[in-house]
Image (spheres, rainbow, N blue to C red):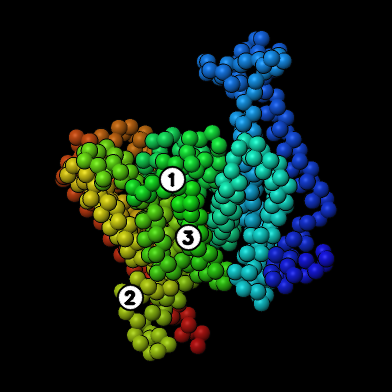
Amino acid sequence: MYTNWISQIGDLNPQLLREIKGRLQKRNVLLVITTSFLTQLGVFLYFQSLLPNSHSIVYVNSNRYCTGKYLDIAQECFLDGFGNVVINWQLWFQDIFSSLSIIGFLAILVAGSYLIIHDLSTEERRDTLNFIRLSPQSPQSILLGKMLGVPILIYLGVLLAIPVHLWLGLNAQITWRSIFSFYIIVITTSLFYFSGALLFGLVGSWLGGFQSWLGSGAVLGLLLLTQQGLRDEISYNYPFAVLKLIDPYYFIPNSLYNSSTELQLENFHWFALPLGNSWVTIIGFAVLTHLLGAYFIWQSLQRCFGDRNATMLSKQQSYLLTIAFTIITIGCADWPKLVFSDYNSNSALTENMAYLMFLNLFLFLYLIAALTPHRHTLQDWARYRHFGNQQGEQRNLIQDLIWGEKSPGVVAIALNAIIAISGLSLFVLISSSGLDHKFHSFIALIFAGSLAVIYAALTQLLLLMKNGQRLFWTNGILGAVIILPVVALAILFSNPTNYTFWWLLSVAAPLIALYPSGELSAITTFLAIMGHMGILGLMLFRMTRQLKQVGESATRVLLAGS
């Protein structure tokens, strides 16, 4: 039977069979079983030690798990007729259930991401990934085998805790529906994060041994940041609420919540629709968000796995990604107050726009990385773009810059910026805020769009270098250009109200425009915009010359060889 099961896996996905055979060794399995049971026992004993008893309440007559009225820090304790402390067992079981839930999904997402990135970087370093590419398996089959097989020991350890986890949830009076909904969320978030880990493992090999630590650390940091920074109920009024959808912490069911969904997301709104009021809608919307994110990542995976020189996204895919991202994030803004209320909420518009532009900053950093071709690709494009396609039709330069696979990505980034700015501008226009705040929001969007295109042009210019370490230098220089001016200005002119013009030339320009000081005059704003245009024009001029030189030199080499 075991042999038949293994052979069936091999028939369905040979890569998965390879990963399972390499990892399910007896020593590894025993270690995982021991670790899983010891973790469960340790959590149980820890919460057992927190229970009050008749001796401890002599000194401190309050405890979280007592049933009396709330005193300074906990509930007052009472004894029953037999001299035993009356315990709130539902709360106790709920706390253990929640703790095991957090440990479980953190183990899956963080440790699983580390293992996937480490495995791909090791395969790349040993050059065995190229042999896998040459196999008859499809890229989807290979990558899915990696996703399911590499963290197989993590899956085993978590599965061993499921019976106890279910028992704890039922004793905490949590419904079966809520428990299995949480499991579905963990599965779909794992698909999303592991897809990102696969992509980072493929494109980030230049980071060396630091790659897996950086990737898993980023996952852990994002999860902890959303757990600690977005707990407040007021966070539902801002676009950052979208980050709660990709953190399973907010889907841990709790029978003590006064809501029908037993979730922390009961106040979640999207375009003023109370999705959090219904268990079906909030779970369905979260799963849809995870699958949509995983879809775009898999588009990048298929392109990068098949051709290492290909960009992570085609230009058409990037436009669809920006549209989807803009709709989802704008929908999480405070629509009830900003649009469907008569209250003139100027500060709410400013805050929501600041959060939306912050989220878009990370989107455009990804788009710049995903759309900017490297030197060799641009060399081919500059050499052959004047020739017709396979049907003999002459290529139009503008169309090639908008849709072409190998053309520079600056125009595509500009179009993506226009798409995002259009959505945000519509949101600003229909808000109930005053004209001054709307005007400042539009100015901030102009600065944000120009910065995105400037960073894209700088990245493209740097990737045209002949240096073999150009990826390292490009990331380092771009990071320095984004961070160092703000640090230098903060040291030299601690208050942004001083020397506002120089602040408007940094990445902080959209925020300065959103929160204007007395010194932000129309002439200062106009000169800053002209400064952005001048910087962009200089970079585009330099990039055009570089592309021309690259194309001419490549053509000369080709003619000399013939």
Tell me the number on the disc at residue 292. 3
Residue pictured at 18% horizontal, 42% vertical: 434
Residue pictured at 59% horizontal, 59% vertical: 198
Locate residue 351 relative to residue 174 in the image: left or right: left
Tell me the number on the disc at residue 399. 2
Q: Where is residue 151 in the image (x, y as percent from the top left)?
A: 68, 54
| Camera-nearest label, 3 or 1 | 1
Circle 1 is placed at which residue position? 276
Residue 342 sits in quarter = top left
Residue pictured at 53% horizontal, 64% vertical: 298
Q: Residues within 10 Å of mark 1 (few under 14, many from 20)?
A: many
N-terminal-most mark, 3 or 1: 1
Give the CA distance from mark 2 to mark 3.
27 Å
Disc 2, SS: helix
> 113 or 260, which is in the foreground?
260
| Camera-nearest label, 2 or 3 | 3
Q: How crowded is mark 3: few (under 14 residues within 10 Å), some or many (20 or more)?
A: some
| Amino acid identity at mark 1 | Gly
